[in-house]
Amino acid sequence: MHRQPIALQPAASPAPLPHNGKRFHVWTIGCQMNEADSAKIAATLQEAGYTSTDKEDDADIVILNSCVVRQAAEDKVAGKLNSLIRLKRERPDVSVVLTGCMVTNQQERLRERFPHVDLFFDPSEFGKLEKVAPEVAEFNDDLAELPHYYADPAAATAAASAFVPIIYGCNFLCSYCIVPYRRGKERSRPLTDIVAEVERLVASGVREVTLLGQTVNAYGHDLPEPAGLADLLRAVDAVPGLDRIRFLTSHPKYMSDEIITTMAELPSVCEHMNLPVQAGDDEILRRMRRTYSRDYWLDRIGLTRQAMPRATVATDVIVGFPGETERQFMQTYDLLQQARCDKVHLAMYSPRPGTLSARWEDDVPAAEKRRRHQSLERLQESIQTEINRDKLGQIYDVLVEGRAKGRWTGRTRGNTLLHFDDPRDLAGKVVDVRVTETSPWFLIGEAVSAPR
Ligand code: SAM
Ligand code: SF4
């Protein structure tokens, strides 16, 4: 099941406007940052009197939130945009809107390519929504600033988990990555704003927050009174009533001893480390401009497991980077064998125009990229089979997110999916669950405690 962020609304905005009978549909692709932005768009339109619909055919405004991190994502956005030509022909009054990473610095080019789109806006320009939804103007003062998110109490009953962006942009220049060109330099939100937001989320029923950033552990370096992620974790942990804190995505360079020991000390911080490595070969890491070595990443994972013996680890890997030889690929294979991660997000390299590596020959053939991808997939499946098999009979506390395929579904503190049957209404509850069946991808269990 895909995690759904709760609908969120801007802080200190005027009272919501009455429903105006118009509907909007938001389609999102990409990372959790995009999901958080989509939640903000939805909340803004709801405040302005619009109603959300699952069906684009029923909508007066269709908003696509795009991702261009990989070619496959960009192709999906283009396909979706083209599929809306029919809707626009049948109902010319429908407003089609495109936002997200595809838009930044590309509006002229996109206008020629997709003339049926009514509005393009940068992820930093939420106020432009007023061009298709004039009622949004009432909230424009808030929207001009860095986005602030607060829970919509009505939506909070449906989800106990919320995304909270804490730092925007990225100061790294990994040679393959488009993000810094589309999302700009790092900008941290003030610590007090984030804590106030979490307090409001908790007051409206949220039990778990995921702090978001492309380099979430670089948090605070740019603030007038510098603070770090460890300071923020301590401040958020002190919010009464909050059960769980997660954060992603971290960069190995900023994964300090202090952050790891703070994670271990604070009761609400989950024992889960999301630390992309990208490659297991030092020469490839150097050409990726990742600024760390294979051994340094292993050291960070080692310290995490030492500080939190039950910690789970997730990472990201790219195969088929320009010039990656079989020997270099096998270094990645060997690293994953050694690290035994609980989850690996695998990607086949695709050149992104404008990045450094796009100037280099994309010389690993597509079939070879697929072979390397499949080889790591098989390795990871066997590792996850073993890791999860060891969980048989163990008891985990699970935060129930909702129902999927007729069962309750939620996550352990280590972020493993766990499904179970239970006649009680457990949405948003924490329950102790004993594992009765395992698979590489999820666990099945039975509740052994009262919900809390
Ligand atoms: N900031 C994170 C980090 O430092 O690893 C990752 C953010 S990136 C937007 C998300 C993932 O997309 C990356 O971890 C990488 O594996 C993948 N990715 C980024 N650019 C890519 C490219 N050109 N080809 C294939 N995968 C790519
Ligand atoms: Fe992209 Fe590297 Fe920044 Fe991550 S750290 S967003 S991979 S440039």
Image (tube, rainbow, N blue to C red):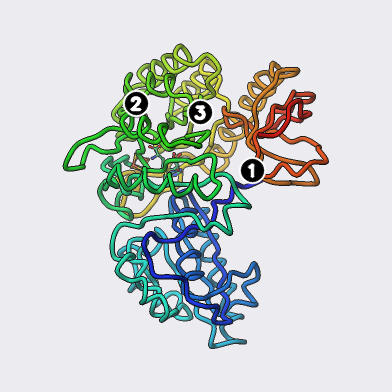
Quadrant showing the N terminus: top right
Mark earlier in primary sequence (1, 3): 3
Residue at x 38%, y 43% (from the top left corner): 213
- Residue 294 visible: no
Query: Residue 192, located in which quarter of the rendered image?
Result: top left
Badge 3 crowding class, 10 Å Cα cut-off, few under 14, some 14 to 19, many 20 or more, is many
Query: Is residue 14 positioned above or below 451 on the image?
Result: below
**Which of the labelled discs sits on residue 335, or is there none?**
none
Badge 2 crowding class, 10 Å Cα cut-off, few under 14, some 14 to 19, many 20 or more, is many
Question: Which residue does the numbered mark 1 point to in the structure image?
Answer: 428
Residue 110: horizontal and vertical position, in percent?
39, 71
Q: Residue furthest left?
A: 224
Cβ of mark 3 under 8 A from ligand 1: no
Taking depth in this image into account, of 157 and 445 the one nearest to the observer is 157
Question: Which residue does the numbered mark 2 point to in the structure image?
Answer: 255
Query: Residue 15, located in which quarter of the rendered image?
Result: bottom left
Q: What element carries label 1?
A: loop
Badge 1 crowding class, 10 Å Cα cut-off, few under 14, some 14 to 19, many 20 or more, is many
Amino acid type at circle 3 is Cys
Residue at x 65%, y 32% (from the top left corner): 398
Q: Nearer the viewer, mark 2 or mark 3?
A: 3
Cβ of mark 2 under 8 A from ligand 1: no
Question: Which residue does the numbered mark 3 point to in the structure image?
Answer: 270
Residue 127: horizontal and vertical position, in percent?
35, 70
